[in-house]
Image (cartoon, coloured by chain):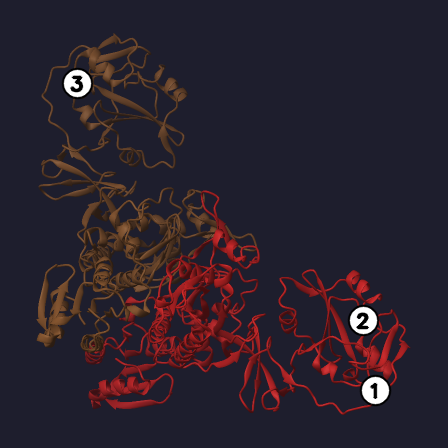
Chain colours: A red, B brown
Amino acid sequence: MKLSKMLISTLREVPAEAEIVSHQLMLRAGMIRKVSSGVYNYMPFGIKVIKKIEKIVRSEMEVADAQEFLASALLTSELLIESGRWNIFGPEVFRLKDRNEREFCLAPTHEETFTDIARNEIKSYKQLPLNLYQIQTKYRDEKTTRLGVMTSREFTMGEACSFDASNEGLDISYNKMYNAYTNIFKRCSLKCKDVEADCGAMGDLSSLEFMVKSEVGEEEVVTCSSCGYAVNMEKATSTSEPMKKEEFKELNKILTPGIKTIEDLEKFFNTTNKKFAKTLIFKADDRVIAVMVRGDRQLNENKVINAIGGAKKFELADEGVVMASTSAIVGFAGPIGIVADLLLVDSEVANMYNYIVGANDTGYHYENVNYGRDFKGLVGDYKKVVEGDKCSKCESQITIDRGIELAHIFKLGTVYSQSMGATFIGQDGKNNPLVMGRYGIGINRTMAAIIEQHHDENGIKWPMSVAPYQVVVVPVSIKDEEQMKIAEEIYNKLKGIGVEVLMDDRNERVGVKFKDLDLIGIPIRITIGKKISEGNVEFKLRYAGDNEIIEIDSVMDRVKQEFVNNNITL
Amino acid sequence: MKLSKMLISTLREVPAEAEIVSHQLMLRAGMIRKVSSGVYNYMPFGIKVIKKIEKIVRSEMEVADAQEFLASALLTSELLIESGRWNIFGPEVFRLKDRNEREFCLAPTHEETFTDIARNEIKSYKQLPLNLYQIQTKYRDEKTTRLGVMTSREFTMGEACSFDASNEGLDISYNKMYNAYTNIFKRCSLKCKDVEADCGAMGDLSSLEFMVKSEVGEEEVVTCSSCGYAVNMEKATSTSEPMKKEEFKELNKILTPGIKTIEDLEKFFNTTNKKFAKTLIFKADDRVIAVMVRGDRQLNENKVINAIGGAKKFELADEGVVMASTSAIVGFAGPIGIVADLLLVDSEVANMYNYIVGANDTGYHYENVNYGRDFKGLVGDYKKVVEGDKCSKCESQITIDRGIELAHIFKLGTVYSQSMGATFIGQDGKNNPLVMGRYGIGINRTMAAIIEQHHDENGIKWPMSVAPYQVVVVPVSIKDEEQMKIAEEIYNKLKGIGVEVLMDDRNERVGVKFKDLDLIGIPIRITIGKKISEGNVEFKLRYAGDNEIIEIDSVMDRVKQEFVNNNITL
């Protein structure tokens, strides 16, 4: 297309509202424009990239034997009441009524729709396996929308559900989708990390997130620099420090007046916080749950919730509950004599010797406490991993990075199929619940992540695979007939072989053109200037940098070569 | 793709809820499934067709120099308050609030967004002309949703706006879009009629609808069987019958006790309703408007509203207003002495001689009334055209059909650009409002219309250009190794040259397969059966009907030929 006919909306200034580089560059290159907080219009160069990513997703879905369909963005309350989520969804879901006062929401996700289709259309094992996907607009009324399209309220999601007759079948479907997503990110030239994610209370099922590093990311990723194992903070474990065995000393109840914090205790006992164990008291729906971790540790709430079999509401207990459980004011909770539905003890605490805990008596602590002799509880891994902990796989040091989730694959199992009655008649003639896998990829996030990883101070450096256009032909002077003639010839030839090519025929100085084109990030720039008198033009790769002088006659071969180098078929 | 891996959801029965054949067949062929009244999920074969139509639209938009963008479906109330439509929109618009109580609606159309983008991004005549389009999901909470996807509450629309510096520029943009839409429907093998549509109060601007005939359609189309001129009922005119000149007779006021209807009057005066003129009284916002048409005629409200310069609210006056205007009860209104802000007189009435009207006096009529001598008013064309009227272009008889609008192109002019301040600096250095054109095409309606025009008693007969898949290979027995081998070979070869091909490898009787495939409507069916022993297979075109026996070796050429015949490039 000719740029003189196109809408170019580049900005020279960095917009104040944009915190991360992808947001800044999407605004500056005229890829998006804000409609409302977290809601964007995609401008011509922006939507081109979105469509390119969607095309890559579609082609990989086909390889994974997934079939496209398209669900309505309007979800009826009936379907969500049935799954139980209508009342669980909070203010992050947009709700609305139609003219007959029927309630709908704008789908934040479509599990119920997938399950509903499956229960209506799948009758027999003969129809399995089945994998359905859609590329569709989702709505989430996010509380904070600080990262441009990374956390927008309206976004395009590629999502899929696989339906299998057995867990073995699910493994195959899941692996196909893992490969598909891996290929998608590879084709988008994105460096992603596979991060193990939490499966909730569903124990041994697998869940994997595809993350990109980002200092402003919402997720914490725990990575071992040695073995490469990466896991979401929610699920992360680390190896406990080995403890030197000690003889059990005599349990002492000690008056610790006016002491409330761990720091006060450290001073009082003249020791480090690693010698204490703290006891935290929570309300999990109707239950009172006490959890012990070492004094220097924080709790991983997610692990606790999974350990107690899930909870709709989970929060620190108020003073009244603490008083009822410990017979003391806040600050003196401990395991000995505590009244709670469950006492969870982090394995690190269970392995310590002769430590200090609250005495469930205002103003008192116990010292020389030992698990087994003085109290018992449900021992498990409840602590939050910290930088410097040791990898649970190889015992090397772990690091913690922030990241943004681009995709998520998840062995759902039979949760939805059981609650919504999505069954099939098996080979044995019996009714069984469908075994489901669940897969989602954020299209707009993927676009932003590509920019995060492919840019310089002048703008975006699109990989060939997702560039809005692959080549731009720039005549230095549109008033020079010879330059224009050669530019037109090259433009038409490239167009003829299917290259997505622009011609910058705007009546602007070439410096202005270069600035715009570098900002927009077209991969290949062919400049037609004075060197045509020697039969030459300039050839520049946005992602490589150097300016080559090449013969006019070799332009086509040079462009084709670049397609081959990037594994893109013309 | 192999059908054994796909979701086939064909229904043998005609669903009771479906009134028109396209709705029936879309349900039966498993193209759509209902979510809620007027809201549908598009199943795998259905979304394939939608994507095909979208692809055709995109390619024609490119020819028309239109650039794709994508607007949010969430429209802020601010933008619509500015254009004045927030309060005009009625219950057909879905409204919602976000977590901060900000008001939005789900866009029923995007004029404001287009205009907003233009005023933000277009500064100078140098950027013109510009044409932006999008293919996007729209929402309208229709009162009745009886025709399947023809009147759905969520639908995909291709819509565009052109921006020009002048009316001459608009003419060029408009013609390009006319050609684009004409080509789209041609490529979809749709027989559409170009129907002149009403431009509202904006007088001489053009507006054209692309309509398909349908007995259940919501629009009336007036067509001349001779010259082919077609026009929407809202705008339709016809030639008045020539009147035999008469001498003016003396005006008589006659007691017509107990007479209220035209039928009563016909009896009383022993004549036809063509000898009367009726006077109807309306409230148009704050004005009282009286309109006269011949006794046998109905009024075209749209023409009246345009003639009085538009009205937000236009309805028949209540008894009180009638009494105030005519000093009589309802049934005796007439032009002589009427008190109204405007008296509109249909030209047919102005050309009649010695006719009967109400006397503005309860129980009385005038006879021998004549325009000019007895009263005056604003003469114009206010009558509704009826079957049998004469074409205003060629005086042949017109017919009236019902139709469904698939697309609409409209010279908007400067309505929105003026009200929203979308201006550009012209060559003269002055600020001018952008001259806009407006274009819309219903993607889902187009799909349904294709089915309406391409089906038989067995199912859909997709044209090659929009078929979900172009070819299906059917081995008669999947247990016959030789048949399967040849079927696989043909399937792979076709796939290799880019044909969208299915293989029906389901373990079903061939009769069942044929029934499904005829219902779904795949254009080319290649059946691999016992005739392979003679080196032959069956070749059948769904849209042509006959079964040919052809040699296995000629299959590829025969398929390619069919692509050529249908002007589809492989």
Residues under numbered marks 2 and 3 in contact, where contact means CB atoms less than 8 Å apart:
no
Q: Which mark is residue A333?
A: 2
Q: Is residue A437 above or below residue B257?
A: below
- SS label for mark 1: loop
Residue B242: image x %, image y %? Answer: 10, 26
Callout 3–callout 1 Cβ contact below 8 Å? no
- Closer to the camera: disc 3 or disc 1? 1
The span from disc 2 to disc 3 (Cα, nearest Å) is 101 Å
What residue is disc 1 on? A248
Type of amino acid at the residue the image marks with label 2 = Ala
- For the residues beneath circles 3 and 1, the answer to whether they share a chain is no
Residues tagged by mark 1 and mark 2 found on one chain of the structure? yes
x then y, percent, for residue B415: 34, 48
Looking at the rendered structure, the kind of residue marked 3 is Thr
Q: Is residue A501 left or right of residue B120?
A: left
Apparent side of residue A258 relative to residue A188 in the rendered image (left or right): right
Chain identity of mark 1 = A
In the image, which disc is placed on residue A124?
none
Q: In which quarter of the image is the N terminus of chain A?
A: bottom left
Q: Specify the subunit that label 2 lies on.
A: A
Q: How crowded is mark 1: few (under 14 residues within 10 Å), some or many (20 or more)?
A: some
Measure the alpha-carbon separation of dots 1 and 2: 22 Å
Quarter where residue B234 is shown: top left
Element type at mark 2: loop
Front residue of A43/A253: it is A253
What residue is pinned by disc 3? B272
Where in the figure is residue B253, as x and y percent of width and height? 25, 9
| Mark 1 vs 2, N-terminal side | 1
Could you say which quadrant of the image residue A356 lies in? bottom right
